[in-house]
Image (tube, rainbow, N blue to C red):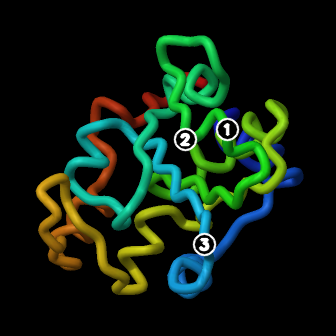
Amino acid sequence: MDQYQQLVESALKTVDEIFPWDLEEEIKVASGLILLDIREAHEFEMMHIRNSLHIPRGVLEGACVWNYDDTVPELAKARDQNIVIICRSGNRSALAAQTMKQMGFKNVRSLKMGIKGWNDNDIEMINDKQDIIDIDEADKWLNKAVSKEKLNPKGLI
């Protein structure tokens, strides 16, 4: 297991996860639920869960507290709210949930399997123009292979 996966596994010991189909049901009945998408802007613009709040992972900590340029009031005042964090596969969201718990957020969970799992279960997503995303097209992008130059050359850690 690589270091990244070790970090994720460690975070998951302290972070609760929710399956996509359970979140779909919760969205229908839960008031005050915050869907926090932490992916990069281009990922979010391409496809996201309707009514998600977009805060990229790189500015999350500053967005969670008051008195910073990155402060997002809706999030900074939500320490006791029900928050589900969303990323592509559930790894970044687990790490973000762990961080938010360390920052005093009481009810944060990670979307298990992320947007990939959401799409695999044929649950609706939209793009930045509010158009519904074709599930098959989303699947092609979400499951593309890692490019050759990003694969580990033999002998390197």
Q: Position of residue 128 (x, y in %)?
A: 18, 53
Mark 1 in CB contact with mark 2 (< 8 angstroms): yes
Q: Is residue 155 visible?
A: no
Check disc 1: other Cα within 10 Å, few if <14, some if 14-19, many if 20+.
few
Give the residue number, with chain letter if any, for mark 1: 77
**Nearest the eye: 5 or 25:** 25
Res. 40 image quadrant: top left
Q: Residue at left 73%, top 38%? A: 100
**Nearest the eye: 16 or 129:** 129
Secondary structure beneath label 3: loop
Q: Is residue 74 visible?
A: yes
Which residue type does callout 3 highlight?
A: Ser
Give the residue number, with chain letter if any, for mark 3: 31
> Which numbered tag is attached to residue 74?
2
Q: Position of residue 71 (x, y in %)?
A: 54, 23
Mark closer to the chain start, 3 or 2: 3
